[in-house]
Amino acid sequence: MQTNTLEKQLAFLREIDQLKSVIRQSPLLDRSRKENSAEHSWHLAMYAVVLAEHACETVDAARVIKMLLLHDIVEIDVGDLPIHGGTSVEVQAEQESIAAGRLFGLLPQPQCDTFLALWQEFEQAQTADAKFAKALDRFQPLLVNIFTEGGTWTENNVSLEQVFSRYGPVIQAGAPALWAVCERWVTRHFQGR
């Protein structure tokens, strides 16, 4: 039994190596290339470590980190679908749910159920941990766009109103202090264009 468990865990770890090949729209801050989804997940985990005190409520940083390390694994099957990319929210949710079932299904029980539950909690964004994790997932690309002179916003003709409506509610719900900083950055960015 122990060998079968280990074999499943190692198969999962080999499978998720593919996350390193999923290229996102967001560039690195030095603009040398686009980041990949594995780098994004790692960076968000660091955001959770550094910024946990700014969550809307007390959070369990270890749970938030786990959610952030798991949240984009589904992109192995569905790719990165940016929020201003035009994909239907319903279609994306369905595709990602199927991918989560397949990928976490590689793991032995109860690990499969634990990881799937954390991924679903992140997606639903109802708990303090999930709200904060979601806020960081929106905050990081916003920061990248600000510090790359508009980055993907410029490439996709994203407006001030779109930024406020797409990023604002999620960041505000999970980390109001971060949203206060974002409002200043975003307003200044769009005034300068």
Image: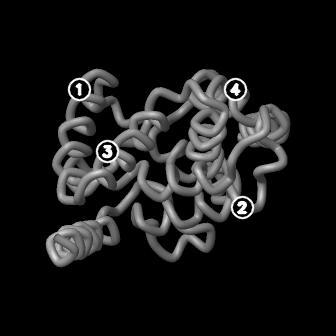
**Residues under labels 4 and 3: Cα distance?**
27 Å
Q: Which quarter of the image is occupied by the N terminus? A: bottom left
Residues packed near mark 4 inside 10 Å, few (<14), some (14 to 19) or many (20 plus): some
Residue under label 3? 113
- Give amino acid for label 3: Asp
104, above or below 54, in the image: below
For the point 18% across and 38% down, which residue is it?
A: 98
Nearer the observer: mark 1 or 3; the answer is: 3
Location of mark 1 (residue): 91
Amino acid, disc 2: Val
Q: Give the left or right position of residue 125, taking residue 58 as reference.
A: left
Disc 4 element? helix
User: Looking at the image, which residue is at 23% across and 26% down?
Assistant: 91
Which is more N-terminal, label 3 or label 4?
3
Mark 4 — residue? 173
The spot of residue 69 in percent (x, y) is 47, 58
Q: Earlier in the sequence, mark 4 or mark 2?
A: 2
Q: Which mark is residue 49?
A: 2
Image: 58 above or below 11: above
The disc label shown at residue 160, or none = none
Q: Nearer the viewer, mark 2 or mark 1?
A: 2
* Separation of marks 1 and 3 at Cα, in angstroms: 23 Å
88 shown above or below 17: above
Label 3 with label 2: CB-CB less than 8 Å: no
